Image (spheres, rainbow, N blue to C red):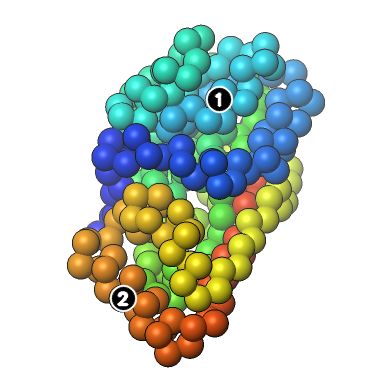
Amino acid sequence: MELKTNYNKIAPAYDERYKLNYLTGVEKSLSDVVSGQKINLILEVGCGTGRWLKALTSSGKKLFGLDYSTGMLKIAANKQKYLYLINADACNLPFSKNTFDMIFCVNAIHHFPDKEKFISEVFRTLTAGGLICIYGVDPHIDNSWYVYEYFDNVYKNDLRRFPSLTETQMICEMAGLYTEEQTVVEEVYSERVGKDVFSDPFLKKHMNSQLANLSEEEYQKGIDKIKNKISVEPETKFITDIKFYLTKARKEI
């Protein structure tokens, strides 16, 4: 069963995550790619509240954002008046062939129900020589996140939802997009001891899709596990160590 996160529900609080970690490494990588290429039209798929498009507004490029959640798009529209925002499905891009010089998505591809169809749509709508940049995490490689230990089925679901780096490269190349690089662009690390774990914003149910997809009962069960662990071992360390990767692929000229 495909898990679908209700982003209309969590949209108002979504940007709280960037107050904790602005993901400057991802932003720098994205800006470097845009500035180092002959690019005019750019599309972000899964643009959410527009955090990444806003980072590119000074680039002088023509920016389009697409998202399935109208709630997220309303927030994006309030941030920047000169974005072209579209409510549509990532697997059926409403654009003509050879439209965009660059398409990118940040921590979003795991939400797309048919990743192969998405990549085939990317190939169709990219210009010759155009780029796809996919930013995201790979739980198949990195699983040092305490949430996986205390909340039942979250890690298993992430293994199913998130494509591995190898799978992402394979899907791109099957569609005719040839991988230029796969590299780490950001590492998120935090260590909280004992009750301090409850100060972690990412432990709130609405702060990430992993917890948002749980029922209230499942979420509370995980919180209770953490509390029980602390009652037995007050100095328990709760570690988050997650890397963000870039997969950059190009459509041949």
Where residue 42 sits in the image (x, y, percent)? 58, 21
Q: Nearer the viewer, residue 111 or 194?
A: 194
Question: Which label lies toward us, 1 or 2?
Answer: 2
Q: Nearer the viewer, residue 92 or 71?
A: 71
For the question of whether residue 252 can be seen, the reply is no
- Contact, CB < 8 Å: mark 1 with mark 2? no
Which amino acid lies under the numbered mark 2 shown in the image of this protein? Asp
Outermost residue toward the right in this view? 36
What residue is rendered at 54% in x and 41% in y? 19
Where residue 206 sits in the image (x, y, percent)? 34, 50
Which amino acid lies under the numbered mark 1 shown in the image of this protein? Leu
SS label for mark 1: helix
As drawn, the label of residue 224 is 2
SS label for mark 2: helix
What residue is rendered at 56% in x and 55% in y? 137
As drawn, the label of residue 53 is 1
Q: Is residue 77 above or below residue 52?
A: above
Q: Quadrant of residue 192?
A: bottom right
Instruction: State the quadrant of the C terminus.
Output: top right
Q: Is residue 169 above or below residue 146?
A: above
Q: Is residue 190 above or below residue 59?
A: below
What residue is rendered at 34% in x and 36% in y? 11
Return the disc, 1 or 2, that comes first in the chain's sequence: 1
Q: Is residue 110 above or below residue 22?
A: below
**How far is mark 1 from mark 2, CA to CA?**
39 Å
Q: Nearer the viewer, residue 16 or 51?
A: 16
For the question of whether residue 115 can be seen, the reply is yes
